[in-house]
Image (tube, helix red, strand yellow):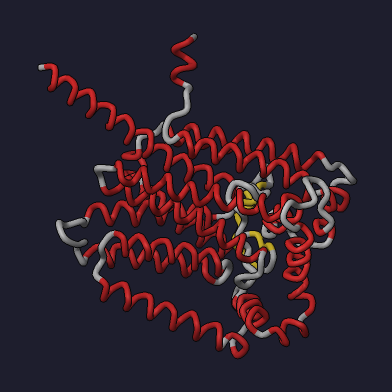
């Protein structure tokens, strides 16, 4: 029996496990508090429904993290191309026959259970796996071989383009993470600067010309949000589009330093999506600026711990994988927070492992599992090396 529980023990960086635990507990607390109005609208006042649903989802997430973190990272390297092909196929399928939610065909409804699956979440993992594997394969002594750039930029361009029209912010974040990975992976600067210049030019041209073009995806929505953010007079005219930003500001300001304490939010009754896109505003209202800083600190500590894991890596693929997955989680978290405090235009990015949801929670858990997998096997190799040195010293 003791051996059974020993085999079930949690491996990898213990600090990251603690971060996962506290983020999930905060998720349960804030989701229960922020879904009261939604429960009365769609569940006849059953305020426990969304709490129980989130509890079950988080239980499943723990199972995903545990299973994924016990698999050697070599398996993820060997399956990277296959996962990428599957994710591209699902993105195309979502375009052709996907479920339209919020004017965006980015969901696939699984028959029988009615679960809405977002292929872009799988594509994020797949692309980071592919970029990490490609960079590791083409590393030379003083740089990365030029062939790596084309093996990376073509899949990145295809995936980001498929995501772009329906989910602008996700495509930008994913493209940014891949760009940083290429920079860290020592891709030639001329290729990096040239590619980012072309992408920026195309995006700016599309947004500027959006009013003259037929309705394509959510380009008009993206343009409107950017214009409203920078042009306050225009934002005042478009009161409906500016409503969520104003309600988030009220939540942030009314929370003060110490907050109103959990369960006492008033803006949850007025703020659209207080349990997902604007959950950080509810955290600031109920837990105050101190609570908001603690949440921010969890993600920054995650970034720091990932850096320690990378320093221990003696192989390039796991190092790139940890960097890419961690940056993806942290950038998404910072984007959600920045929207809630009106530092950037409104996006639809959830707060990783905190916001209510299905697909995002599942693939964020898989990402955490992969990070812990690398940490686990790096620690095992470190122990073996130490034992080998001791044996040599004894001999």
Percent position (x, y) of residue 202? Answer: 45, 82
Q: Nearer the viewer, residue 149 or 91?
A: 149
* Residue 156 location, quadrant: bottom left
Place residue 102 in its image quadrant.
bottom right
Q: Is residue 135 left or right of residue 353?
A: left
Residue 4 position in % (x across, y down): 47, 14
Residue at screen point 54% across, 41% down: 19
Residue sitting nearer the eye, 111 or 325: 325
Q: Which residue is rendered at x = 41% and y = 46% of the image?
A: 306
Residue 368, visible in the rendered structure: yes
Which quarter of the image is occupied by the C terminus? top left
Residue furthest to the left in view is 395
Residue 213 x, y percent position in the rendering: 59, 87
Residue 215 visible in rendering: no
Q: In the rendering, at what x and y percent does residue 6 appear?
A: 45, 17
Q: 105 left or right of 16? A: right
Q: Residue at x 56, y 44 (%)?
A: 362
Q: Work out whether 58 lies above or below 136.
A: above
């Amino acid at each position: 029996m003791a051996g059974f529980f020993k085999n079930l023990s949690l491996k990898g960086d213990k600090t990251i496990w603690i971060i996962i635990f506290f983020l999930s507990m905060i998720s349960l607390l804030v989701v229960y508090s922020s879904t009261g109005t939604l429960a009365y609208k769609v569940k006849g006042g059953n305020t426990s429904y969304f709490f129980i649903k989130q509890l079950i989802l988080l239980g499943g997430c723990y199972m995903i993290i545990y299973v994924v973190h016990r698999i050697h990272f070599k398996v993820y390297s060997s399956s990277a191309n296959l996962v990428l092909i599957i994710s591209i196929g699902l993105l195309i399928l979502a375009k052709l026959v996907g479920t339209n939610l919020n004017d965006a065909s980015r969901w696939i409804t699984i028959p029988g259970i009615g679960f809405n699956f977002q292929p872009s979440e799988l594509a994020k993992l797949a692309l980071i796996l592919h970029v990490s594997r490609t960079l590791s394969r083409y590393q030379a002594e003083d740089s990365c071989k030029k062939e790596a750039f084309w093996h990376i930029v073509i899949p990145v361009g295809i995936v980001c383009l498929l995501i772009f029209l329906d989910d602008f912010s996700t495509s930008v974040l994913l493209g940014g993470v891949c760009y940083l990975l290429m920079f860290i992976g020592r891709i030639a600067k001329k290729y990096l600067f040239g590619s980012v210049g072309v992408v920026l030019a195309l995006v700016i041209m599309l947004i500027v010309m959006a009013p003259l073009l037929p309705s394509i995806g959510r380009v008009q929505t993206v343009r409107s949000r950017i214009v409203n953010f920078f042009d306050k007079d225009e934002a005042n005219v478009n009161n409906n589009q500016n409503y969520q930003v104003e309600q988030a500001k009220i939540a942030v300001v009314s929370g003060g330093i110490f907050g109103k304490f959990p369960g006492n939010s008033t803006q949850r009754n007025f703020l659209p999506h207080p349990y997902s896109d604007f959950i950080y505003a509810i955290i600031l209202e109920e837990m105050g600026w101190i609570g908001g800083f603690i949440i921010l600190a969890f993600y920054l500590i995650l970034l720091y711990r990932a850096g320690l894991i990378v320093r221990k890596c003696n192989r390039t693929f796991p190092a790139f994988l940890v960097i890419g997955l961690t940056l993806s989680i942290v950038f998404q978290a910072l984007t959600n927070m920045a929207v809630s405090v009106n530092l950037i235009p409104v996006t639809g990015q959830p707060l990783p492992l905190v916001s209510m949801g299905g697909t995002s929670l599942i693939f964020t858990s898989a990402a955490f599992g992969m990070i812990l997998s690398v940490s686990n096997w790096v620690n095992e190799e470190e122990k073996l090396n130490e034992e080998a040195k001791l044996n040599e010293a004894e001999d």
